[in-house]
Amino acid sequence: MPFPVIDNAGPHPRARGQVRAMPVIIDRTTSSRRAPAQPARLSLTPAPGGLDGTWWPRSRALTRELPTLTAALVEHWGRITDVTVHPAYWPVIPHWVSVAGRTVRVGWSTQAQDPHRLTFFSVDGRRDVLVIPPETGADAAAQLMAGDGIDAPAREEAADGIDARIREEAWETDGGAGRPSSLPPGPSARQGLRPAEVREP
């Protein structure tokens, strides 16, 4: 016994050997192309204490953020071969990223690497970039990127304070309460700064 074919007109028995053609509508107004990557929010102003630049990523997704940053740095520092990170603030660390058709190896260390730095290796040596937590308010991020006489240890301490505040807020959201006195308060999280382009001294 043939199975009925259901359409808007109701059930009809399908005759043996017949094929029912159904109309297909293709929506060509939606593009499958990805949006272009936003420029890296990066300052290449050196800081006393061994920093060669400051970077404010838009997220903690290193697989998405690192190619854009590395591509921007290649223009100023030449070909980069390796990057080393500390795993504390990056949920996923890729083994490598592709930049301009070349492979850049990504490694991690909990001993030799500062949690708030990325270390880049090229044919010219190594350079260190401070990472401003992506959740940082625009005013605080702009101040850290501009430098304003802040040396590397002070910038790292500020970044650590921001991360501590973020962890505390996440803890309170998950059911905790109160502010532990051991955690320093972070700067205010105001929004509105235009994305910072690559700035050099």
Image (tube, rainbow, N blue to C red):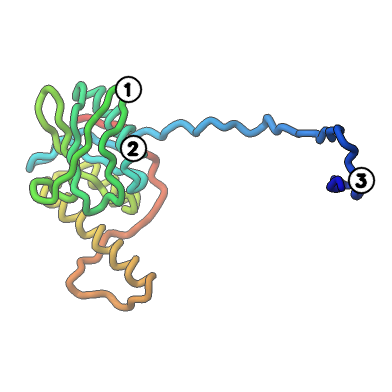
Residue shown at 19% from the left, 27% from the top? 81
For the C terminus, give its image quadrant.
top left
| Residue type for callout 3 | His
Q: Position of residue 51 (x, y in %)?
A: 13, 39
Whole-number angstrom distance, CA of label 2 to CA of label 3:
64 Å
Residue shown at 91% from the left, 46% from the top? 12
| Residue 6 in view, yes or no | no
Q: Quadrant of residue 104?
A: top left
Q: Position of residue 167 (x, y in %)?
A: 28, 64
Q: Residues within 10 Å of mark 3 (few under 14, many from 20)?
A: few
Compare residues 15 and 90 and report the one nearer the observer: 15
For marks 2 and 3, the one nearer the N-term is 3
Q: Quadrant of residue 22?
A: top right
| Residue 78 in view, yes or no | yes
Q: Position of residue 124 (x, y in %)?
A: 11, 23
Q: Residues within 10 Å of mark 2 (few under 14, many from 20)?
A: some
Mark 1 or mark 2: which is in front?
1
| Residue type for callout 2 | Ala
Whole-number angstrom distance, CA of label 1 to CA of label 3:
58 Å
Q: Are marks 2 and 3 in contact (CB under 8 Å)?
A: no
Label 1 element class: loop
Q: Which mark is residue 196?
A: 2
Compare residues 139 and 185 and report the one nearer the observer: 185
Mark 1 or mark 3: which is in front?
3
Q: Which residue is outermost to the front?
A: 1
| Residue type for callout 1 | Ala
Question: Can you identify the residue that label 3 sits on?
Answer: 12
Residue 182 position (above or below residue 93):
below
Q: Viewed as shown, does residue 142 lie left or right of 80?
A: right
Residue 155 position (above or below residue 103):
below
Question: Can you identify the residue that label 1 sits on?
Answer: 100
Mark 2 or mark 3: which is in front?
3
